[in-house]
Image: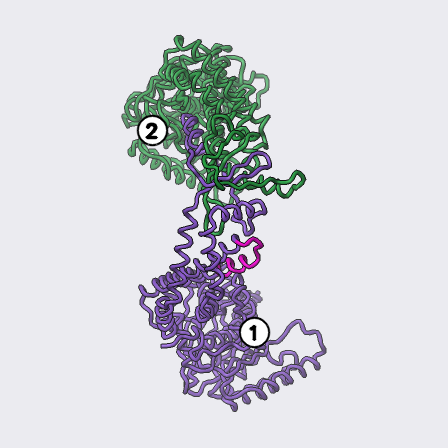
Amino acid sequence: MRPLLLAPSDAASGLPQIANADDLIRDLELPTLLSAMSGDDEYIWGIARQSLLLPLVDPPSIRYRQEALEDALEHPSVVRELYDIATEAVESEKERFFGMFRDNPDSTLGGSVRLLELLVPMLRRLRAVADRHVAEFGSQAFTGFYAMLREQLSDEYLDEVERHIRNLDPRRGVELATRMGHVGETLDYRVLRPRRNGWRDWIPSVMSRSSYSFEIPPRDHAGFRALGDMRGRGINEVANALGQSSDHVRGFFAGLRQELAFYVGCLNLADRLAAKGEPTCMPIVAAAGEADLTATDLYDVSLSLQFDERVVGNDIDGSGASAVFITGANGGGKSTFLRSVGLAHLMMQAGMFVGATSFADAVSTGLFTHYPREEDTTMQKGKLEEELARISEIADHIGPGALLLCNESFASTNEREGAEIGRQLVRAMTESGVRVVYVTHLFDLAHSFENEDAVLFLRAERRSDGGRTFRLHEARPLETSYGEDLYRQIFDSSRAAAQGGSGTQP
Amino acid sequence: MTFESVLFRGGEQVPSGLSAPDHFVDFNLDQVVDALTARREPYELTPLFFMPLHDANEVRYRQAACRDLEDTVVRRAIDHFAAEMGAVRQRREHALQLRHRYHRYRWYREAVRVYAEAVKTLRDDLHRVGLHSEAMISLREYLEDYARSSAFIALVEEGDSIDEELAAIRYTVQIVGSRVTVRRYEGGDDYRRDVERTFSKFKQGDAKNRLVIYPERADLNHVEAQVLELVAALFPQSFGRLSDYCVSNQAFIDPHLQRFDREVQLYLAWLDFIAPMRAGGLMFCYPKVPTASKRTNVVDGFDVALAAKLIHEGGTVVTNGFSLEEDERILVVTGPNQGGKTTFARMFGQLHYLAALGLPVPGTEATLSLPDRIFSHFEKEEDIETLRGRLEDELVRIHEMFEQATSDSVFVINEGFSSTTLTDSVFLGGEVVRRMIERDLLGVYVTFIDELASISKATVSMVATVDPEDPAKRTLHIVRQPADGLAYTAAIVSKYGVSYAQLKERIVP
């Protein structure tokens, strides 16, 4: 019994976490996005993080989630109600039974009985929601989920569960069948199925000397301990079976909560973005290598979440481009754009909407970032060596169909050397089927690709008065950079500070 | 063929009350034996290490046995046997402490069962392997005979038959409140399956195992013991057989196998001790032990106590060789401090002692004579007596050594007489070395006095070397070359640019 709200089968989930998760979190400013998704629910943070960092790579899986998410966006209160039931089941169990399961079969049995007494009504509530709303949902994920609840959690079934719970109450007697091991120890204890009228009505089938009894004297504490130990050994397996069963039921709720947390996180994010008028759309997704990036009004969701006003988006038509070079003014929105591409990819491949009016692209088989690492300068290795070491690490994991985002890579050395290394990197990557988006002020690097068809050049714009629009447009690299502007902006306090991305200093 | 001992061809016993030879601490062999015997306490192996052999045939008897034990298949068989024998002892001792009759009998029978399995398994295992040593081949033949004996066969067959009968008994224990009732089992289903079936739809992967691990206890508690008594009352015939069996098989362990079980651990302890060093690339070999010659030769030897430590810490071990040909008898070792001289002397002593234990020794090849005794004198830096008292003690000690030594003894002397004046040191050192030569002793003499290295053709000069590029670095290589303390001084001076030529050049205006 699995909710299967995130994927049509178990096989589609459980991908290993990607190796460069920490880089992505830092370079794409994921914490801002995750905070917006989780709101005041800590739990959602972890699930959202996991969903973004375990990207789906096949379009059908992504569409499965997109459809379910559309259902959720249409019926947010039902989805939140389901999430609340699952949360209540998981949380109340934590409060009441924390520490109850000691290494003692009797307490395992007792704890499991009490836990199940609490969870069975929750199962009944889930089924009630399913009965009420089954007709309103259209996605495969939610209709399948409701059908499963209605089929598996019938009244007869839930009654049967409650009968076991009563039978196994530790206060009742128990009969164990067993045999002896090598040294007189009992082996293979098993609890016999209770007789209809309970143990006290046991009538021997033969009245010969086929049974012997003794009684523990009332004040023999050691005797009761010893008896308890024996009983413990005897009920060990049945206690384990019920303990595992209650774990499974609790696991069902935990799994359900986990899957719903993703959708609730998406609902929270959608609320935040809608409140400030930012557009969102479901991306049109193609298999790896079968489409190029095209988007309108693509913006950096993480940046937007930090401001009250809307942020500037960009249109891009990357048809036929295997490499994109972004050049132009410092502080002109280059790294913001780079981040918007990365975020859109992570969100698309989590099955989410993206921050754009329209967005279409192929999935990437891996998303990699190569950003400057300021703090690493204290290391023994030189800065360039450190950068090369990270490229080497990326090379360990990257493959065809991947997307590499470079932000001022190799700016730590002189332009000739940096450009040469960058050229070799871009050529090697694109020829291997990796798409590269490269923010650089290394004119020589960008310039050397100007005669290639499969390369798109974007440039950060500047208005004639020297101010910036934060909008990129298709344009060849210029040999001058805009350091002087930045200088002015920072040193001339009379000019209003522009709304800002975090431009990287060359 | 008879089999008495895997350590002694003639089967002699190690006398009780043996203590460590005087040189043990100087050679750090105390550390080695501590490491060897750790986790093998029940075997009381330590005295076995205090009895070096003096007969080359006895040494070869052990070397051959040890070679057989290096075969991994043989080794596995012996390890298995050892573990089983340990289990037998444990069970038997345990049974003897139990109060309740049937519980005691069941543990006792268990000890016999494990013993019989151990014997049969060892016999079968040894049957399948190629053995080359007299010791192991005669053990194998002994085992074949023993396992075929009618007494052993009866022990096994009656025991198995009783086990089968008891294992077939089924009964139930009903617990209601404080009342316990024992009955013959007359059918009834396992309720656990009902529970699992009901909840199977929630199953996802493996749930946390909530089975409590109950220790296999020695004592049944008194309630369980009462249950066992009642089960015996339900099945009186079967339990009667068990008690007859235990009463009539009191001493079931064969004394020869018991002795083997202990003695073979000497080899295993050593092989286990050297295994990490071998894995670290160090070589061990079985030394030749000539009887009529003092030719001595070791290639790539090392201090085994130090190497064990270094390998454990992930360090590298420097190996050193030496040889004494024809009339050569004494290695005179000179060179800078911390250059590995003491380690070299220690290695020399260890090699001779280990060879006399019949064990593989450090080195890729070795020829070592078997000394009747090994004497050591290592300067003790922590001595705080007066110079005179200390020198006196040293001389008394060395005199005693000469008193007790024969021409078959080995001397290892480290930094003798350094506590006195140079003239005295030159004189006393010369005297001791000359006396060693006179007595035809084999040995090592570590000194800072170059002259001792060239006293006669019986002395061989060995020098601790330094890195020619960086004289502050010790290579820890001890090589055969003329002693020249000044060579090191010149190198270190030139490194810092303060040699005569350098100073003249630099001082020129």
Asked if residue B218 can be seen in this view, the reply is: yes
At x 70% / y 81%, what residue is drawn? B389
Q: Is residue A21 left or right of residue B72?
A: right
Mark 1 belongs to which amino acid?
Answer: Phe
Question: Exactly how many numbered labels are in the figure?
Answer: 2
Q: Is residue A410 above or below residue B270?
A: above
Q: How far across and down, in percent of the image, does residue A317 sit?
A: 33, 18
Q: Residues within 10 Å of mark 2 (few under 14, many from 20)?
A: many
Segment colored magenta: B86-101
Q: Say if the magenta span includes residue A168.
A: no
Secondary structure under tag 1 reads helix
Give the overall secondary structure of the magenta segment: helix
Q: Residue at x 54, y 30 (%)?
A: A200
Q: Nearer the viewer, residue B110 or B267?
A: B110
- Alpha carbon distance from label 1 to label 2: 71 Å
Q: In the rendering, what colour is chain B?
A: purple
User: In x, y percent, where is residue A284?
Assistant: 34, 17
Crowdedness near tag 1: few (<14), some (14–19) or many (≥20) residues, C-alpha within 10 Å: many
Q: Position of residue A113 (x, y in %)?
A: 53, 27
The residue nearer to you, when weighing A272 against A48, is: A48
User: Depth-wise, is mark 1 or mark 2 nearer the camera?
Assistant: 1
The answer to whether residue A295 is seen in the rendering is no
Secondary structure beneath dot 2 equals: strand
Q: Which residue is tagged 2? A: A435
- Disc 2 residue type? Arg
Residue A455 falls in which quadrant of the image? Answer: top left
Q: Quadrant of residue A398?
A: top left
Colour green belongs to chain = A
